[in-house]
Structures are given as structure tokens and as C-alpha cells.
Amino acid sequence: MPPQSLCPIGAASIPPTAVRLGPLESTMQEILFLVEEAEDGSFRASAAAAAIHTEADTLEDLHREIRDAVVCHFDPGQAPPLIRLHHVRQELLAL
């Protein structure tokens, strides 16, 4: 039995030629995500150099969602082998 796709049903039906990446993207060794905590305690992540965005209630779930989103974004075998997370934390100081 073939492995199940991690991509949403609609994404799996896109022909591979419709999402081909340029030479620069296909040699990417790492992808960077900016991770922020929302006011409700959930987490959001956005890739710095690609149109990949996801969110989850916990960091553990966010890690899984990020991996799935990266696999879905790239052609098979083209995803970078490393995912770097940069946690952005905002603070407000009163004078």
C-alpha cells in the first residue's frame, strides 16, 4: 500500500508540473519559520522565504503542522532537509 499523503486532499490533486520550483528553491538546504504565540495561547508559524503558513494549539502540534506544510509545499524529494524555527516574542514595557 502506498504511503498516505500528508497534503490536504485538494493539494494532492495538483499536477506536479503546476508547482515546479525554480533552481534556487530546489537547492535549499534549510527553511526558516518565524513562530509567534497568539493572544489566545496558540502558535502561528510563517516561512521567511516561502508562502507557507500554519498554526496549532501547542508547540508539539505546531512542529507536526510545519513538517506537513513543508512536505506539501515542495515537489517530492525537493523539500529542504532542515527546518529552523525562530521564536519571536513581543514584550511591552511601560515607563
Image (spheres, rainbow, N blue to C red):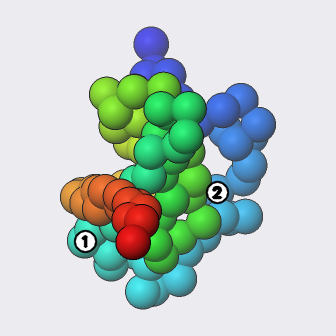
Q: Position of residue 67 (x, y in %)?
A: 38, 42
Dot 1: element? loop
**Front in this rendered view, residue 38 or 51:** 38
For residue 17, side relative to residue 34 (left or right): right
Residue with the mark numbered 1? 29
Whether 87 is drawn above or below 24: the answer is: above
**Front in this rendered view, residue 48 or 6:** 48
Determine contact: label 2, label 1, CB under 8 Å.
no
Amino acid type of the residue tagged 2 in the rendering: Pro
Task: Characterize the local packing of mark 2: few (<14), some (14-19) or many (20 or more) Cα atoms within 10 angstroms.
Answer: few
Mark 2 and mark 1: Cα distance apart in space:
21 Å
Amino acid type of the residue tagged 1 in the rendering: Gln
N-term-proximal mark, 2 vs 1? 2
In this view, the mark in front (2 or 1): 1
**Front in this rendered view, residue 18 or 59:** 59
Whether 24 is drawn above or below 56: the answer is: below
Q: Position of residue 40 (x, y in %)?
A: 56, 32
Q: Residue at x 40, y 54 (%)?
A: 35
The image quadrant where one finds the C terminus is bottom left
Residue with the mark numbered 2? 16
Whether 70 is drawn above or below 21: the answer is: above
